[in-house]
Image (spheres, rainbow, N blue to C red):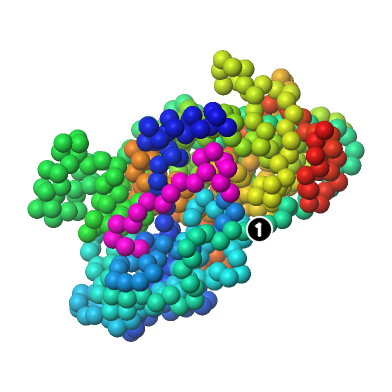
Amino acid sequence: MDAVKRLARFLAVAGLAFASPAWADYMGPSYLKVPGVEGGAAQAKYQGWVRAEGNYWTARPPRREIRGISGKESGLKFTGPRTPANGPSALMLAIDKRSPGLARMMEVCRSGAKLPELTYAESSELARHPQEHGPRPSSVPEFYEYALRGVRLTCPVVADAPEQAFGVHFEAIEWLNYTPQPRPIPLTTAPARLPGSARSGTSRAFVVSWFAPVADANPGQCPVMNRKPTQDEYFALMPPERAAQQRAALAKGGGANTVVMPFRGPDEMNVILLPGLVADPGHVTPVADVVRGFDLDGDDGSGPPPSHTRAHRNFTSPDGRKGIDNQLFTIQGCIAGWRRNGFLPMIGNELRRAGGLSILIEVSGIDNERNDDDVTVTILYSADPMRRDGSSKVVLPDFTFRVNDNPEFSQDFVRFRGRLVDGVIMTNPVGKVTMHEGPASTWSLAQARMRLEFTADGGLRAQLGGYRDWREFLTMAFFQASDYENTIGFNSPAMYNATRRAADGLKDPATGEFTGLSAAYEIEGVPAYIPPEQHLQLAAGGAFKGVPAR
């Protein structure tokens, strides 16, 4: 772990990544009940309320803390909302301009009338800290509900913005169904119950030496790259007098920096937290026909899309498979910091290679390395560090890795069933895979599947694909606010709008919206060993209980 700590100190000094505080508030639907306003929301409990697309509490919320750079802090906890315990304070909202309730909301706002009371509801899952995982406790409601009293609305207009800004300024607040907690609630969980592995054949294990999104298809895929926000964007919506004041105040530091840059929305609202409040700056997508990934929806895109998917660009894989769904590639493929040699893959993989959490992949039941009708593929985790050759980033093969029996990780062990055809393993889908990329990054893929092949030098080359919840993806992508805009090379409002448009799966039966973004990740691994006792228990299936290695 010393190497991880040294890297963390470097990041803190550089001000670039996981070591400084972060913004990541609430992205996704919440609901506002306003007397006399029919909002048209479709969510069962809040039908007829006004739906908002995101929120944050107070005019300038403090950044959230980054947790666990060393991997020692558990993510098995549930933190309550960042809602003020009392008033006066403010709630900042973004409402889609297509909302049935918007016209009436604007009338109420422009009247300047004080409203005696509004009711507001926000999802407890979307409001929790983004580095947490594990089940919602029974003591936590699905939606937190609040009564806001003595309310005045503000509603600055940006003509070309897709969403309308509202400031809900209240004198008092009452928490209706939850009591503020001074500390996060610790969670308990159980190891995943794995099905038994294939009964015959040999097994091969690998430690993952590289894991990153598929963001590269061809050298010329980007006529231009996406850009960070400009100085002019920060001042664009300010009244002239305020803009002049800010220019003078920031001049000695070279202009608007990453601390103030998020507040470039109307009324200096935060566009990292509410990125729909300004006009869409436009997002550059890559030009490519051949892209790695999977056919997740069973459709090749040649005709009208089936009801469970949104119409989108389909690709062809390098091995000739049609109908490849990889909309995450369209978002990240022209962002320099997400490309193969970009900042984020480099940092994430370096943290893992320098002693962070190791990802293991075991392939079992191999009767024939070219063709086999029944093999199993298992994703596991180990606290044992990778070994390197001392002079480069090369991970050394053939070391033993003990399987981590900590339920925080063993709850997410997953086993796929697959077939080996002409040296390539294709697995069946599983409902959900939760990946622990490292202490700062845990996320899920729905309808997940894998493609794997053994390399000539004994290693592994693989892909993992499925649907990411676009809200979870953006919450993590924006976790470092304008620090990441500047370092990785994107504009948050542009990326937000592009991602919402790109979401192509996981159709919500109530609203008809698509919450899933098709995605694929590239994996490389070197040969490794799992202790025999642990291998035998894993092969038997059930909950992994941590048989000690000799």
Question: In the rendered image, which quarter contains the C terminus?
Answer: top right
Q: Is residue 63 magenta?
A: yes
**Vertical arrangement, residue 198 with respect to residue 153, above or below:** above
* Residue at 32% from the left image edge and 62% from the top image edge: 58
Q: Nearer the viewer, residue 332 or 94?
A: 94
- Tell me the chief SS of the magenta region: loop
Was residue 355 drawn as part of the magenta stretch in this picture?
no
Q: Please tell me which residue is depicted at 72% across the width and 45% down the height of the picture.
A: 405
Q: Position of residue 36 (x, y in %)?
A: 33, 84
382 to 156, vertically: above or below: above
Quadrant in the picture for residue 294: top right
The magenta region covers 57-74
**Along the viewing direction, whichever of 92 and 303 lies nearer the viewer:** 92
Counting other residues with Cα less than 10 Å from the Cα at mark 1, is it few (<14), some (14-19), or many (20 or more)? few
- Residue 290 in view: no
Which residue is under mark 1?
188
